[in-house]
Amino acid sequence: MKPADTCDKAEMTALKSQIIGWCGELGFQQAGIAGVDLSFAERRLTDWLQAGFHGSMDYMARHGSKRSRPDELVPGTLRVISVRMDYFPESQETAKQILDDGRSAYISRYALGRDYHKVLRGRLRALARRIEDRIGEFGYRVFVDSAPVLEKALGEKAGIGWIGKHTNVIDRDSGSWFFLGELYTNLPLQIDAPEESHCGSCTTCIDVCPTKAIIAPYSLDARRCISYLTIENKEAIPLEFRKDMGNRIYGCDDCQLFCPWNKFAKLTAEADFAPRHGLDSAQLTDLFSWSEATWLEKTEGSAIRRVGYQGWLRNIAVALGNADTTAAVVAALSLRRRDDSPMVAEHVEWALEQHETT
């Protein structure tokens, strides 16, 4: 391939059109091209880190400016192809019914099917091969939430949507139930116009957050967020947040479930994102009875593996503590009262105490 600064503009215009078309053929619902100036996002990230809102996620600060400067992470990067893939598998009313049923386990809907990292990464690599077949070798690297990349800022800059007050990206025609992926490249493709915010005066996401983690519009204190507490956090769940967790055992979707823009969300047609092993409506007592071998079998190829088996039991113990008192709930907890993990045992003891006082 000839040097990027000598590429023909008309050739790049035609290639961009082909890339957008290929993205659709590969199962992406939208694609856009972003430049690499993320200076505004860099300032917001710096302020967020200095406030300590990242909690124990030290990796958010580990790579310095590489996260907000794509050309430092991958030298020679001129553009970022940002793509989105819808994942919501069911109606929002169905998800809300599970959330309201204290006997059922609520798992963030993105984690019900196959690990999205693998799905999007494979499709993006296929996209790169198509480009390569068209123009020959070129510089690129694929990312799916797997490196120091500001994917939301890049998605916004590429016109995929705007970053809402809950800090997720929203598309006005499709809502926010989608994954993002990126292909960093040295191709001087035409840049798309960034999307403007359409949140207006709405504060629904802030109002419904169970733990008040959205401390101000566009500002999330991860240390209070149920997604952080149940997945990223590897220690005990702070006492102040246990009751507010309800039956959420892996992540939290409230800020999306109640966002008015998600009335436009479309269900995914992607088979890989279909719920597996009945996890979309499983009973807490059933999941709490899984041995580690069963858990490993049922979560193979799933994003849920990130939490680890002990974290899984810890989270379910809290949810059982928040459930209505029944003989089945108390019996399930009692069986793990002396769990080999001190952390799990402590959460089980807390849960049993909730039923002794009701």
Image (tube, rainbow, N blue to C red):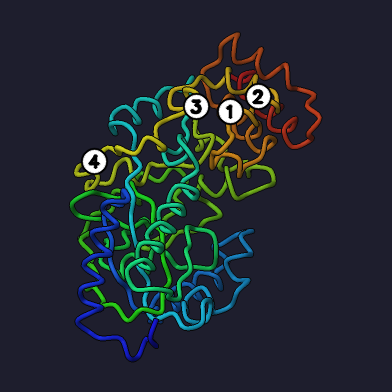
Between discs 4 and 3, the one toward the N terminus: 3
Please state which amino acid type lies under the numbered disc 4. Lys
Q: CA distance from mark 1 to mark 3?
A: 15 Å
How crowded is the residue under tag 4: few (<14 C-alpha within 10 Å), some, or many (20+)? some
Q: Is residue 97 above or below residue 310?
A: above
Residue at 49 percent across and 19 percent down: it is 103
Instruction: State the mark number for residue 266.
Output: 4
Q: Dot 2 corresponds to which residue? A: 294
Q: Dot 3 corresponds to which residue? A: 105
Q: Dot 1 corresponds to which residue? A: 298
Please state which amino acid type lies under the numbered disc 1. Lys
Q: CA distance from mark 1 to mark 4?
A: 27 Å
Q: Are marks 4 and 3 in contact (CB under 8 Å)?
A: no
Q: Residue furthest top?
A: 327
Q: CA distance from mark 4 to mark 3?
A: 24 Å
Please state which amino acid type lies under the numbered disc 2. Thr
Residue at 37 percent across and 86 percent down: it is 4
Q: Are marks 4 and 2 in contact (CB under 8 Å)?
A: no
Residue at 61 percent across and 19 percent down: it is 355
User: What is the secondary structure assignment of the residue under circle 4?
Assistant: loop
